[in-house]
Image (spheres, rainbow, N blue to C red):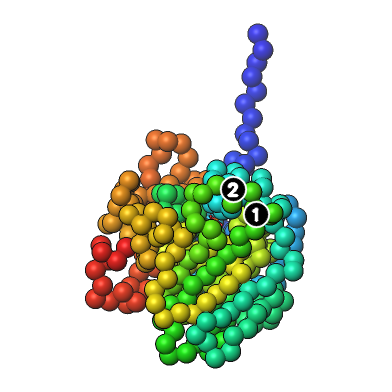
């Protein structure tokens, strides 16, 4: 008979540094400095987990006003469980096939109802504003969520540069659609190029990020390199990847999802546990990496993904059941 020696998988052993950090937290909880110090701790914890395979560092500094106090999703999960239909519809497809995306050179044209239209390359964007690290909760319309340390700057910094005219009410985002680089374009799941849009005040909101990295390194291709949008109080599909055009317009644009499945996707798409998707409930979610297994209890989805304090005023007086 063979005797089985039990082993503990390395993933279950808490590294010393992380363990020490946890002790530090308990001490802080006993003092007053909890909130600020906690946000710093979460930033450090995020990096302790990162261990990116090909370090391609960005110079960033944490903005502790925008660090949520939840455990960040591992770098591995953030970069291997993705939606990026230009590379296929399975969650593993983007990581497998996005290698063909050419991110250099890259240009983003900013045009439409602005006084100073301009084309930015990535170096221009990196010079536009300090790159911050912000840890945001992200909720996909499909019912899963992650906590991601993004690196970017408020989109408002770019908007200021181009000086929108008073008639500009909406901002439309167009992403790359190139058959030679993106095998997923062969399928007609949605209308290409993938487009999204925000109202100008949503685009100018301090939470809305133009994002160039995550976990302190340049954006991996599967996450929307070299530049994407991140809008944490809306379902993940509003956060368009691999942006090539930003256009200021007067009328509300129709996004690719609104055109492809109008009965399911509206313009606002704010996370709202009280408004079901026509085919499933939006009341709860599964946190990728943490809520393991089919029978694990799901967590309650928060109104506006937990950012209601900061953004609810944008929708004052609107019926959010109609304006989903
Ligand atoms: N952007 C483009 N260009 N194409 C896409 O298919 N998918 C969206 C959004 N942005 C998508 C996109 C959806 S449905 C989600 S949930 C998020 O990207 C996922 O971002 P992540 O893979 O970095 O988590």
Q: Nearer the viewer, residue 108 or 29?
A: 108
Q: Residue furthest top?
A: 1
Q: Secondary structure at mark 2?
A: helix
Residue name at image x 62 percent, y 34 percent: 8
Task: Specify whether residue 223 is in view.
Answer: yes
Q: Mark 2 sits on what residue?
A: 186
Q: Quadrant of the C terminus?
A: bottom left
x and y, in percent, of residue 298 in the image: 38, 45
Residue name at image x 52 percent, y 77 percent: 247
Residue name at image x 53 percent, y 58 percent: 192
Residue name at image x 44 percent, y 84 percent: 168
Do the CB atoms of the residues marked 1 and 2 lie less than 8 Å apart?
A: yes
Q: Mark 1 sits on what residue?
A: 179
Q: Earlier in the sequence, mark 1 or mark 2?
A: 1
**From what the image shows, is residue 55 above or below residue 287?**
below
Q: Secondary structure at mark 1?
A: loop
x and y, in percent, of residue 190 in the image: 48, 53
């Amino acid at each position: 008979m063979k005797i089985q020696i039990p082993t503990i998988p390395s993933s279950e052993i808490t590294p010393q540094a992380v363990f020490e950090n946890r002790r530090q937290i308990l001490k802080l909880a006993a003092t007053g400095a909890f909130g600020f110090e906690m946000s710093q701790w979460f930033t450090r914890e995020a990096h302790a987990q990162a261990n990116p395979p090909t370090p391609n560092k960005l110079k960033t500094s944490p903005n502790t006003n925008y660090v949520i106090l939840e455990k960040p999703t591992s770098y591995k999960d953030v970069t291997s469980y993705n939606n990026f239909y230009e590379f296929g519809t399975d969650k593993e497809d983007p990581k497998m096939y996005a290698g063909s995306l050419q991110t250099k050179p890259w240009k983003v044209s900013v045009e439409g109802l602005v006084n100073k239209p301009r084309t930015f390359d990535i170096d221009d964007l990196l010079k536009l504003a300090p790159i911050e690290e912000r840890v945001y909760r992200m909720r996909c319309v499909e019912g899963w969520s992650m906590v991601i340390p993004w690196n970017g700057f408020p989109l408002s910094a770019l908007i200021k540069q181009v000086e929108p005219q008073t008639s500009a009410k909406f901002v439309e985002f167009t992403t790359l659609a190139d058959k030679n680089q993106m095998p997923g374009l062969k399928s007609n799941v949605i209308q290409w190029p993938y487009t999204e849009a925000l109202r100008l005040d949503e685009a100018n909101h301090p939470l809305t990020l133009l994002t160039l990295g995550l976990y302190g390194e340049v954006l991996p291709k599967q996450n929307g390199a070299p530049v994407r949008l991140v809008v944490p109080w809306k379902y993940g599909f509003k956060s368009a990847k691999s942006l090539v055009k930003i256009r200021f317009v007067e009328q509300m644009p129709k996004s690719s999802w609104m055109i492809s499945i109008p009965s399911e996707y509206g313009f606002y798409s704010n996370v709202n546990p009280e408004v079901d998707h026509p085919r499933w409930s939006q009341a709860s979610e599964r946190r990728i990496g943490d809520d393991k297994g089919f029978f694990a209890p799901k967590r309650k989805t928060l109104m506006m993904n937990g950012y209601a304090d900061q953004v609810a005023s944008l929708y004052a007086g609107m019926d959010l059941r109609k304006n989903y």
